[in-house]
Image: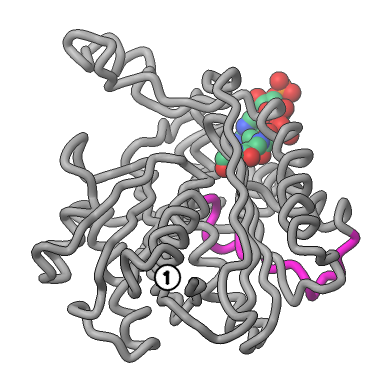
Amino acid sequence: MPRTAFAAVGFHVPDRLVTNEELTTRMETTDAWIRERTGIRERRWVREGTENSDLALEATRKALATAGWQAKDIEAIVYASLSPDHMMPGDGCYLNAKLGIPGVPALDVRNQCSGFLYGLAVADAWIRIGMYRRILLVGSEIHSTGLDVSTRGRDVAVIFGDGAGAALLEATDEPGRGVLSCHLHADGRFAAELSCDAPGSKYHPRVTAEMIESGAIYPRMEGQKVFKNAVVRMPEVLREALDQNGLSPKDLKVVVPHQANLRIAQMVQRSLELRDDQVFNNIERYGNTTAASIPIALAEAVEARDVRRGDLVGLCAFGAGFTWASALVRW
Ligand code: UT7
């Protein structure tokens, strides 16, 4: 049975840089509060007219160039996002068109911060059963058009950023190489702790002027509850992956945790007793880009930490749903 190797990872962020200082002009907040509570110094927000699938296209182009593949080499697209261009169809189809690969299947994944890892689990299963040999897995988000950038929404608005990451996955028969395992979890009892109420099909019409006025169109979060669950679930699910493979934290070259909050990543590090060089964070520059955060950070980590063939890479995520997930990859 083949395994799933990462042929290349690429990322793209918008050129518009939004500093904490800029946010202080739009809401009651301070650079110090944002840095101390989240670790974020700046994030990228799109200029008007940029679409989620545009970010994904740029990230994909970079990954294609690194791998030396052409778009026509892609046999399937898996697209993780909570912020698609439209309610329907999913962004996988828009990306398929922008890449010029009609007929190539496109699956959309709606698992928020865990979306990239849920997508990886699906792509990995497809490759293992021999259904496809080359898959494009994308995580892409535009948060900035859906945030309440005022004091009312400040707890959420300061956190989120826009961006996209793309991984090109291919079947390999090289012994020991590739995705070792993926681990997925969800607990819908906590759905309300981090959610966006409208537009929604439970409403008729799906969105009203009152919903816009009341802020029901913006994501809302019970920050502390999410935080407390994240710091337990992320190390737990990474340990689950290590245990299943008979490995230990010291075997890891690098862990790329979902970039939700620097303090969460630091607690994951402490819990697993990892050295600083074993954890890669870039939230200070991009904020939380949900489904895009792992592939963006992974693309940077591969360069910054000189990840080579045979190195063990750990990925873990936690987010809305609640959902949480991990994967181990022998690079
Ligand atoms: O990726 C998806 C998963 N998401 C996460 O994992 C996020 C998890 N949660 C968090 O990262 C943190 O809970 C936050 C960063 C969202 C908030 O940090 P916190 O330390 O939990 O703050 P808090 O919500 O307990 O709020 C503390 C205070 C409050 O004021 P009072 O009631 O103490 O007077 C807030 O109103 O900070 C206030 N506050 C702010 N002040 C300045 C909330 N947001 C801001 C802000 N600027 N942007």
Q: Quadrant of residue 12?
A: bottom left
Looking at the image, residue 136 lies above or below residue 231: below
Residue annotated with mark 1:
167
| Residue appearing at x 43%, y 35% in the figure | 149
* 231 to the left or right of 271: left
User: Where residue 298 sits: x, y (%)?
Assistant: 56, 70
Give 7 or 132, whichever is nearer the viewer: 132
| Residue appearing at x 62%, y 49% in the figure | 183
Looking at the image, residue 240 lies above or below residue 178: above
| Residue appearing at x 52%, y 53% in the figure | 117
Confirm whether the magenta stretch covers residue 279.
yes
User: Where residue 154 sits: x, y (%)?
Assistant: 54, 32
**Total of numbered circles in the picture?**
1
Q: In which quarter of the image is residue 257?
A: bottom right
Give 95 or 124, whichever is nearer the viewer: 124
Using a 10 Å C-alpha cutoff, classify the residue at mark 1 as few (fewer than 14 neighbours), some (14 to 19) or many (20 or more): many
* 271 to the left or right of 29: right
Confirm whether the magenta stretch covers residue 194.
no
* 130 to the left or right of 293: left
What's the magenta region? 273-288
CB of residue at label 1: within 8 Å of ligand 1?
no
Q: Quadrant of ligand 1?
A: top right
